[in-house]
Image: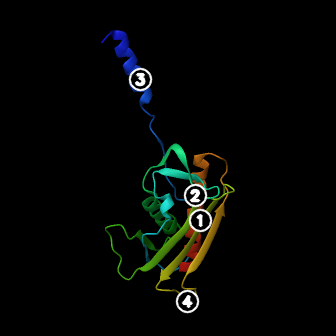
Amino acid sequence: MTRRTALLLLLLVGACTSPDPVLYTLRATQGTPKAGASRAVVLRRPSLPRYLDRNAIVTGMPGYKVETSGGERWAEPIGSMFARVLVQDLAQRLPRSTVLNDQTAVTLPNATGIDLDVQEFGPDGTGAVVLRAQAAIEPPRGPAPPVLPVRIVVRPAGATTADLVAAMSEATGQLADALAAALR
């Protein structure tokens, strides 16, 4: 093999490698702390739509199509990331309570449980982030309905994936606001 051929092969191999992906994560957002008695709260593993269960970020859903980001990925599985951030948001809003995810090694006997079924979480056809869910709090508190329906819409500040992820983080924080109010 000539030196020139070796150089060409080296250049071809270098051209075939892809750049490292850009990784994103949801972040906890600040909310208004709620006064109230201290309690133990456990967020049971929330169910998320299976179309979100991928490394690529769902960036659009026009018609019946699911569009994903190119080289932009979630830094961790979205189910565990969503639960982790929602627990952080709830803990900030319920400062006198202990809030945990049921996937931790710590158990809280006699804790109030939150079951959460997320039916939609991401951009709709207009580009707004929609978080639609149903929550059940056990044991129920007062006259609250057994299932709390929640629909949150947040418009991203721009058209980038970072703007989309920030809007998803904001929607998660607004869900924590609704759950904290229901727990009072």
Q: Quadrant of the C terminus?
A: bottom right
Classed neighbour count for the residue bearing mark 3: other residues with Cα under 10 Å, few (<14), some (14–19), many (≥20) = few
Local packing at callout 2 (Cα closer than 10 Å; few below 14, some 14-19, many 20+) is many
Q: Earlier in the sequence, mark 1 or mark 4?
A: 1
Chain-order first, disc 2 or disc 1: 1
Residue lying farthest to the right in this orientation: 126
Q: Which residue is mark 4?
A: 142
x, y (%) of residue 153?
Answer: 65, 63
The residue located at (56%, 58%) in the rendering is 169
- Check disc 4 and report its element: helix, strand or loop: loop
Considering only order in the chain, which callout, 3 or 1, is on the residue closer to the N terminus? 3
Asked if labels 2 and 3 touch by Cβ distance under 8 angstroms, the answer is no
Q: In the displayed structure, does residue 24 sit left or right of residue 10?
A: right
Residue type pointed to by label 4: Gly
- Viewer-nearest of labels 3 and 4? 3
Image quadrant where one finds the N terminus: top left
Q: How far apart in space, not on screen, are marks 1 and 4 (Cα)?
A: 26 Å
Left or right: 16 in relation to 129: left
Q: Residue at x 44, y 78 (%)?
A: 113
**Badge 2 amino acid:** Met
Q: Earlier in the sequence, mark 3 or mark 2?
A: 3
For numbered disc 1, what is the local secondary structure? strand
Mark 1 highlights which residue?
131
Q: Is the residue 101 above or below the residue 56 in the image? A: below
Residue 129 drawn at (x, y percent): 62, 59
Q: Earlier in the sequence, mark 2 or mark 4?
A: 4
**Image quadrant of residue 133?**
bottom right
- To which residue does mark 2 refer? 168
